[in-house]
Image (cartoon, helix red, strand yellow):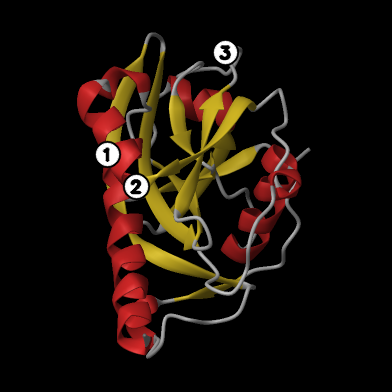
Amino acid sequence: MNNQIIIVDNQDNAIGYGEKMEVHQKDLLHRAFSIFIFDWSDQKMLIQRRAKEKYHSGGLWTNACCSHPRKDETMEKCLSERLKEELGFEKQFRIADPNDSESLLDGDDVIYSCGSFKYYARFGSLSEYEIDHVFLYSPVMQRFSKSDFIGNPEEADALQWITIDELRKWMGDSPEEFTAWFGKAFELAYGVLERQRNVLRMME
């Protein structure tokens, strides 16, 4: 298995590669991604609880899928591959910039790029020092079923669909139950989600 992840500079330019655990042990800035999934039919977002055996943040809640692009892997490929590995969901994505879209109502193969941010968090002998690229998968015309997403027990020990209001209250009441990157990533994804909502309102 290709376990070499991408080491980057502060501008997210690739400057090398490293084995995943070594990169996290040495505080090396690297590229990551976070995927959010929203079902418009019941107005709920999918979140997962990281498996307790994960190398850090086990038992904490986070977005539907988060991982790292690997060496020689396009972002489109890694988004599809990691969703399949973690949630059993198969889709070949094309990445769209919402700033280039007039409608924000593209097809079910579109995943929106919501921006990126850099953060650092320490977990004992490991760290997350990442430029996290945030993506939102929210096809307006598709209804998801529970069987569409089946958590890999090595990655997630629970999945939950939750409304935005319920999620915001939970985050405010118990922030310690969520991963270090979740709050900032959520706000980026939510910004694009709200733009979709405004488009839908105008169509009513």
Q: Which mark is residue 52?
A: 3
Q: Picture coordinates of residue 29 (x, y %)?
A: 37, 39
Identify the image quadrant of the C terminus: bottom left
Identify the image quadrant of the N terminus: top right
- The three-letter code of the residue at mark 2 reads Ile
Q: Picture coordinates of residue 84 (x, y %)?
A: 73, 48
Tell me where residue 166 sits by quadrant: top left
Residue 5 relative to residue 192: left or right: right
* Residue on which the image places disc 1: 168
Mark 1 in CB contact with mark 2 (< 8 angstroms): yes
- In terms of secondary structure, where does tag 2 sit? helix
- The three-letter code of the residue at mark 1 reads Arg
- In terms of secondary structure, where does tag 3 sit? loop
Q: Picture coordinates of residue 2 (x, y %)?
A: 73, 41
Q: Is residue 34 at least partly visible in the picture?
A: no
* Residue on which the image places disc 2: 164
Q: Identify which residue, 199 or 22, lies in the foreground.
A: 199
